[in-house]
Amino acid sequence: MLQILERYPFSNLISLRSLWYGLSLFTVGTNSFGGGGTYLPDFGAPKYWIIDSITLVTCLSWSYLAKGPIRALSALAGLIVGYIVSIPFGLVDFSQIMARGVVAFPQHFQLVCISLNLVLSFQ
């Protein structure tokens, strides 16, 4: 053990710093798991616990069961599954998408007249 400490003197410091960052983000995780913030009237409602538990199990099982480079996509898999599970609970609002249309053509840019004084002022 002493040889490892002599060979990598900063490894314990880095481990402690990583642990400190993880513990400092614990409150963020618990607020998100409970529904987004304690200021909400339904904070900690069972629907949030169900959705977040399914999302967490998805991320962990993807990370454990996947092989190769696709294993790194566990957060994306959890995001997609959590989004799909949130739809029946009424937490996803499609009104803005439906109001503007799913497919839209880009608007043309207006031509802008460039002033010669503006160009000369940057020289």
Image (cartoon, rainbow, N blue to C red):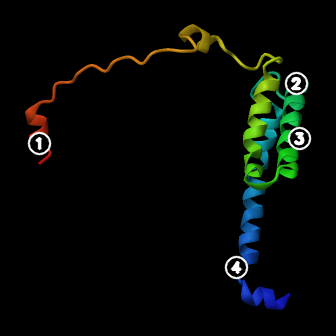
Residue 57, which numbered label? 3
Task: Check disc 1 and report the residue beneath it.
Answer: 121
Q: Earlier in the sequence, mark 4 or mark 3?
A: 4
**Residue 61 point in image, percent of width and height:** 88, 45
Nearest the camera: 32 or 58?
58
Task: Check disc 4 and report the residue beneath it.
Answer: 10
**Residue 98 point in image, percent of width and height:** 61, 10
- The answer to whether the residue labelled 2 contacts the one labelled 1, judged by CB atoms less than 8 Å apart, is no
Name the residue type under label 2.
Lys
**Residue 65 point in image, percent of width and height:** 88, 49
Which element carries disc 3, helix, strand or loop?
helix
- The answer to whether the residue labelled 3 contacts the one labelled 2, judged by CB atoms less than 8 Å apart, is no
Task: Check disc 2 and report the residue beneath it.
Answer: 47
Q: CA distance from mark 3 to mark 1?
A: 59 Å
Dot 3 alpha-carbon crowd within 10 angstroms: few under 14, some 14 to 19, many 20 or more: few
Q: Earlier in the sequence, mark 3 or mark 2?
A: 2
Name the residue type under label 1.
Ser
- The answer to whether the residue labelled 4 contacts the one labelled 1, judged by CB atoms less than 8 Å apart, is no
Q: CA distance from mark 4 to mark 1?
A: 53 Å
**Residue 36 point in image, percent of width and height:** 75, 32
